[in-house]
Amino acid sequence: MALWRNRDLEDILGGKLEQGVITEAGLRKLVEAIPVESEFVEYKSCDEFKKPPKTEFKQERGKDVSAPANGRGAILIYGIEDDKKFSVVEERMKPFDGEADAHKLIEQFRIDIRQFVAPTPLFDMFAVEASTGGFYLVLVVPPSAGAPHAVTAGPGKERQTFSYFVRATGETHIRTLGEHEVADRYSVRHRRQEDRARHAATVWSEGRAELTAYSGALVWLAVAVVPDVPVDGQLTTQVRDEIKAWDNPQTFPDSILGRRESARDYPFPAPGKMVYTDLGQDQRTGTKIPKAAGSYRELHADGSTYAALMLANGGEGGQDVVLDPDDLIDAIASLVIHTLDWTVERSGRWGNATVQIGLVVGENSRAMSPSVRLATSGGVSVHGLRHARDGKVATTLADLASLHTMQDKLRVAYSAALPILQGFGVIQPAWLTEDGEIRDWGLIQEFRPTALTWATDRGVGVDDSEL
């Protein structure tokens, strides 16, 4: 998945800024469309990698990476000459020859950045095949939530010096940040943390309000995911179409145990998001209106997500609501997988995301919310466990850059499940491990074949150990 989204560059290159999507033809179109280096595009000669391994050259690499990380991001391409040397596009396309080792070049580049930039910014670097048999190296640097990043004197230096650079807005050159600008960026780093917390609280509260908008002691499990650095949050017709195009092939919920059917929900536009829910009848007017029933989802334009599954109906009698722990774990996994998938798709695979999870319990006609307890799948109460009530929301972090496989997402699901289960007095999920594997021993026989097939189909490991 792409670390950084830039719509203008994607339109030129023909897709996201990631390996396997960018091609030599796309790079050629980029040079034709943006012949002169800009704030977001820089062309570099292969000769940059022929320079001796001196400190000043490694610091120059650090400058090339830290500047866009401190600014608004950029893409750098090694293997395309500067326009000052050549004016014809084909003459500027001078990739590495086939004898060069792309993996070794990238590895050394990453080592240099790690040694000479603090804190180390996140970036992606990959090779793009050339028709001549060689390759280009593409460096994608997103704007960093951890800015400012400094170029240092290097490892082992007794006296460290720090230099801060940024790509000048609307210009082609890199400039040094002034002292007040450095101070301001440190302040922004802290403010971003507060802004993220407020935004996460807003996403959660607005989603929760939709689940409790109508009377009924319904018990929901909800998950909200908010990326550290969201993209543009305006819902345009283009964004609406992108959301719908992404969602159409999705299976929600993707039940590991096969206990839930795919939701038959409908998309409705709302401020900054598309809401996926059912159509219910308005008791006052008799007309059909969007109404959360069985499942509810919000896919935000900025990459945030809110999703919920109904676990039980408390009815009007005031009795405790009994939840099946296997169904609860299955719902947690389904919600975490789906919400993370949208966040990564929309905002890119970089930085952290705040993951919130909690039970949402509605009120019956007497304005009372039932307590919730766990039972075994056979319906017998689990001895010595606590009852839980609505209101407790747990928070964990997900490293988006580490979410490459389904098992990676299940690791996040495990972390999200812990506070929910421990709220009832259960230490951990019976059939989901810390490593994101399916624990064979914890599965009851009824759902075991389905769960193991699900794991095999999605490349998820199976753990044969006991709890």
Image (cartoon, rainbow, N blue to C red):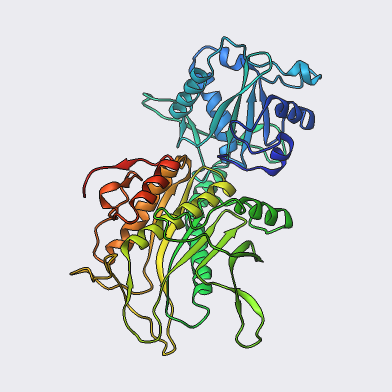
- Residue depicted at 41% across the width and 53% down the height: 256
The single residue placed furthest to the top in the displayed view is 99
Compare residues 158 and 314 and report the one nearer the observer. 314
The single residue placed furthest to the bottom in the displayed view is 366
- Residue depicted at 46% across the width and 58% down the height: 335
Quarter of the figure with residue 125:
top right
Q: Position of residue 407 (x, y in %)?
A: 40, 43
Quarter of the figure with residue 273:
bottom right
Q: Position of residue 4 (x, y in %)?
A: 59, 41
Which quadrant, please, contains the N terminus? top right
The single residue placed furthest to the left in the displayed view is 384
User: Is 417 placed above or below 88 here?
Assistant: below
Q: Is residue 85 visible?
A: no
Q: Position of residue 155 (x, y in %)?
A: 39, 25
Total of numbered circles in the picture? Answer: 0
Instruction: Specify whether 289 is left or right of 226.
Output: right
Instruction: Specify whether 418 is left or right of 73.
Output: left
